[in-house]
Amino acid sequence: MKILGNILWFLLTGLWLGLSYIILGLLWCITIIGLPFGKQCFKLAKIIFWPFGKEVKADFSKHAVLNVLWIILGGLELCIAFLLGGLLWCITIIGIPFGKQCFKFAKLSLMPFGATVE
């Protein structure tokens, strides 16, 4: 089921989201100040391509200042977008696993600093 879920996710959602995070990460990496934010975009892109079977371990208090800056600079909008996407996926029974992945990404996209993907 994990392999089938990853393939369907990649074709329906993951390819476009992952590529957009890679482009966003490259834009952040243009400046030295944006390097930590670009690194987080690449971490998010890696999990967005193939999310099924991966867990997110969070320790958000570890980098509180960077998480607050991330929220101000676009993390809140990303979180809201993933929440809306998750709600749309959960309209049908078949889409519920994909909606759960969107909710996982909402939490991760709100405060990515200090989170690890396993």
Image: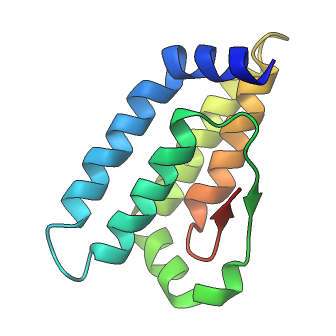
Q: Quadrant of residue 62?
A: bottom right
| Residue positioned 65% across, 66% down in the render | 116
| Residue positioned 76% across, 38% down in the render | 53
Q: Is residue 112 above or below residue 100?
A: below
Rendered location of residue 73, percent (x, y): 38, 68
Q: Quadrant of residue 35?
A: bottom left
Q: Could you tell me which quadrant the C terminus lies in?
A: bottom right
Q: Is residue 11 above or below residue 63?
A: above
Rendered location of residue 20, percent (x, y): 33, 39
For residue 72, side relative to residue 89 (left or right)? left
Closer to the camera, 40 or 2? 2
| Residue positioned 65% across, 69% down in the render | 115
The mark tally for this picture is 0
Rendered location of residue 80, percent (x, y): 58, 47
For residue 42, side relative to residue 35 (left or right)? right
Q: Is residue 116 above or below residue 5?
A: below
Q: Could you tell me which quadrant the N terminus lies in?
A: top right
Q: Quadrant of residue 63?
A: bottom right
Q: Is residue 53 above or below residue 87?
A: below
The scheme the figure's colours follow is rainbow
Kindly give the residue lying farthest to the left in the view shown: 30
Kindly give the residue lying farthest to the right in the view shown: 93
| Residue positioned 70% across, 20% down in the render | 3
Rendered location of residue 7, percent (x, y): 60, 16
For residue 49, side relative to residue 83 (left or right)? left
